Amino acid sequence: MDSGIKERLDAFIERKGLRRTGQRDKIARAVFSKDEHFTAEELFDRVRRTDPDISRATVYRTLGLLVEADLLREIDLGDNQTTYDPNFLDKPSHNHLVCIDCGKVLEFEDAHIDLLNDCVTRRLGFKPLRQTLKIEANCEQLRKNGRCPNLIAARLSGKRLRKKR
């Protein structure tokens, strides 16, 4: 875990009058060990591999704490689940492109979108604080070839897939 994140978390815990715990530290390390989006259940499964004593409730409480500390962001990728994004601190205005077939998520940044958001919010009398943009699309593999290796890999790995509308 990045030292800046650890310092911000420790300061937040102290301000809230909470105590540092080993389980909370393990969960925070697991959250920030990868740049991947995850659900609470995926994090719970990952953490339980290293410490089977960590409860689901502790994982959920720690996630809430990390969101409240503004270290982690809850995002909606359209799959009726809360997904967490651990890397918005490094890239605060990144956006998401989501394949509606295989669930693959790509992050992207675009200065034109940032400029447009800034212009629109200022014109309407607001000051932009953060933005999110989610584009749902079909991946090119499926469109061109009729099959998507990401979809096959997702099904084989047991990855959660989007519900068809």
Image: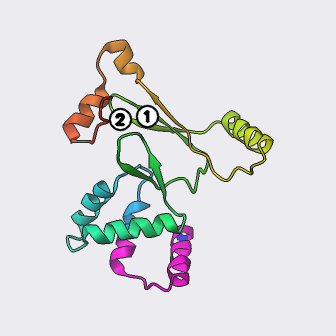
Q: Earlier in the sequence, mark 2 or mark 1?
A: 1
| Residue depicted at x 55% and y 64% | 70
Per the image, the residue denoted by label 1 is 98
Q: Chief secondary structure of the magenta span?
A: helix
Asked if the residue at tag 1 contacts the one at tag 2, i.e. Cβ–Cβ closer than 8 Å, the answer is: yes
Give the percent coordinates (x, y) of residue 8: 56, 73
Is residue 25 shown above or below 134? below
Is residue 89 shown above or below 138? below
Residue 6 visible? The answer is yes
Give the percent coordinates (x, y) of residue 33: 41, 60
Q: Quadrant of residue 139?
A: top left
Q: Is residue 128 left or right of residue 87?
A: right
> Dot 1, how many residues are within 10 Å of its Cα: few (below 14), some (14-19), or many (20+)?
many
Per the image, the residue denoted by label 2 is 103
Give the percent coordinates (x, y) of residue 119: 77, 39
Q: Nearer the viewer, residue 159 or 68?
A: 68
Residue 110 lies in the magenta-colored region: no
Q: Quadrant of residue 7?
A: bottom right
The residue range painted magenta reads 4-26
> Dot 2, how many residues are within 10 Å of its Cα: few (below 14), some (14-19), or many (20+)?
many
Secondary structure type for disc 1:
strand
Which amino acid, by three-letter code, is at mark 2?
A: Gly
Q: Nearer the viewer, residue 118 or 29?
A: 118
Point out the image quarter for the C terminus.
top left
